[in-house]
Amino acid sequence: MINKYKVKHTSIMHNSRLYKEGSIIELSDEQAKRLEDFVDLVNESSIKKQQKNQNVKMSVKTNVETKSETVKTKENVKENEASKGGTADDK
């Protein structure tokens, strides 16, 4: 039987794929037995909760990155205008 497990304490290479600590991995009962010190059986509700939390973190990170890039872009425009000796409004 195949179940879902959460990787703990380390990363696991399984079927040519790296599963970092905290990742969800599908394993047979036999595979899970060999890795019992490094995986915990999880239920579906905890998987959905983890995925929701990851989506929220990604959304917040993206918004912060976008704001930083916007600020940098405005600063770069001001620096470029100053080095040319004028502003975009001069045209």
Image (tube, helix red, strand yellow):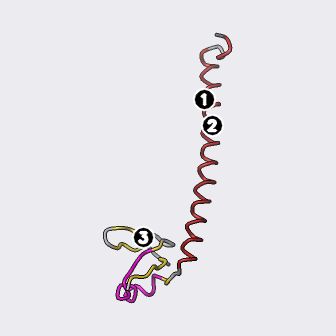
Report the residue marked by disc 3.
19
Report the residue marked by disc 1.
76
Local secondary structure at mark 1:
helix
Q: Residue at x 49, y 77 (%)?
A: 6
Q: Is residue 61 visible?
A: yes
> In this view of the protein, which residue sits in the foreground, 8 or 84?
8
Q: Which residue is drawn at 49% across and 83% down?
A: 40
Q: Is residue 48 above or below residue 29?
A: above
In terms of sequence position, does the residue under pointer 2 or pointer 1 come before the other? 2
Q: Residue 1: x and y, percent?
A: 37, 86
The 10 Å Cα crowd at callout 3, few under 14, some 14 to 19, many 20 or more, is some
Q: What residue type is labelled 2?
A: Thr
Local secondary structure at mark 2:
helix
How far apart in space, not on screen, are marks 2 and 1 (Cα)?
10 Å
In terms of sequence position, does the residue under pointer 3 or pointer 2 come before the other? 3
Q: Residue 54: x and y, percent?
A: 57, 63
Q: Residue 79: x and y, percent?
A: 62, 25
Looking at the rendering, the stretch of residues picked out in magenta corresponds to: 25-39
Q: What residue type is labelled 3?
A: Tyr
Local secondary structure at mark 3:
strand
How far apart in space, not on screen, are marks 3 and 2 (Cα)?
34 Å
Residue 57 counted in the magenta span: no
